[in-house]
Amino acid sequence: MTLAVSFGVVAAVTLLSAVFVVHSKNLVHAVMWLALSLLGTAALYALLDAPFLSGVQVLTYVGGVVTLMIFGVMITRRHDGSRIEAGAVKPLRAAAAAIGLFAVLGYAVVETEFPMVERAVPPTTSDLARSLLDDNLFAFELASLLLLAAIVGSVVLARRRDSEPEAHGGVATTRDPSSGNP
């Protein structure tokens, strides 16, 4: 298979799994589709001759973030055989946001001049580290703070939803970790 065909297949699988993440009604299934989407992104990095980024993608996102999300679902929700449903969706708002984002990104790609520069030496891991930790340190740390805020916010929202009185027949319940019962 040529590089262009394999890139197209991997990109299609990645895009399709991302669509399943959004449309999945079961939260655990959505996390599994997300794992496939992130693995597809790692495969795209590998096809673009960026093995270090591919490895970091697998270790950080597939290995770390997806595992954290699964543990978060397991900790914040009871597992008594019931399905864990994802929240309500607003398809018109989501479509409008997606079209707007696609339009802005498309405009940026069309208007950007990409110079065809051939490098005699491919970038090394130290070049990438210097770029992330010297030149772009502020953006790198800002992204990590944003991810931390998203994780904390999702745990707070999940805990609040678990203790709502109307969700349990008018009685707020909390889980006793020592008994194993809700």
Image (cartoon, helix red, strand yellow):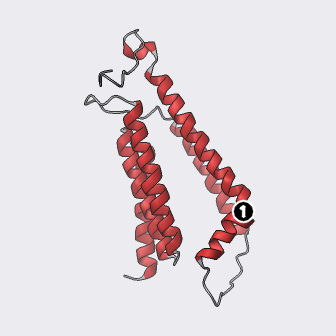
Q: Which residue is mark 1?
A: 136
Are there few (<14), some (14-19), or many (20+) residues within 10 Å of tag 1?
A: few
Camera-side residue: 135 or 177?
177
Looking at the image, is 71 positioned above or below residue 47?
Answer: above
Question: Where's the N terminus, which quadrant?
Answer: bottom left
Per the image, label 1 sits on a secondary structure element best described as: loop
- Please state if 120 lies on the left or on the right of 7 as rendered: right
With respect to residue 30, does 47 lie above or below? below
Is residue 35 at least partly visible in the picture?
A: yes
**Which residue is found at the position 52% from the left and 29% from the top?**
157
Residue furthest to the bottom in view is 120
In this image, 143 relative to 25: left or right? right
Q: Residue furthest left?
A: 81
Q: Quadrant of residue 138?
A: bottom right
Query: Which residue is pictured at 42% across the width and 13% down the height?
Result: 172
> Is 114 situated above or below 88?
below
Residue 13 pos. (x, y %): 40, 62
| Image quarter in which the C terminus is found | top left
Residue 21, percent from left and from top: 43, 47
Q: Nearer the viewer, residue 106 or 156?
A: 156
The image position of residue 34, as x and y in percent, is 43, 51
Left or right placement of residue 151 versus residue 162 in this view: right
Image location of residue 161, percent across then percent down: 47, 24
Q: Quadrant of residue 179?
A: top left
Amino acid, disc 1: Asn
Q: Quadrant of residue 70?
A: top left
Give the residue displayed 48% in from the left and 56% down from the top.
61
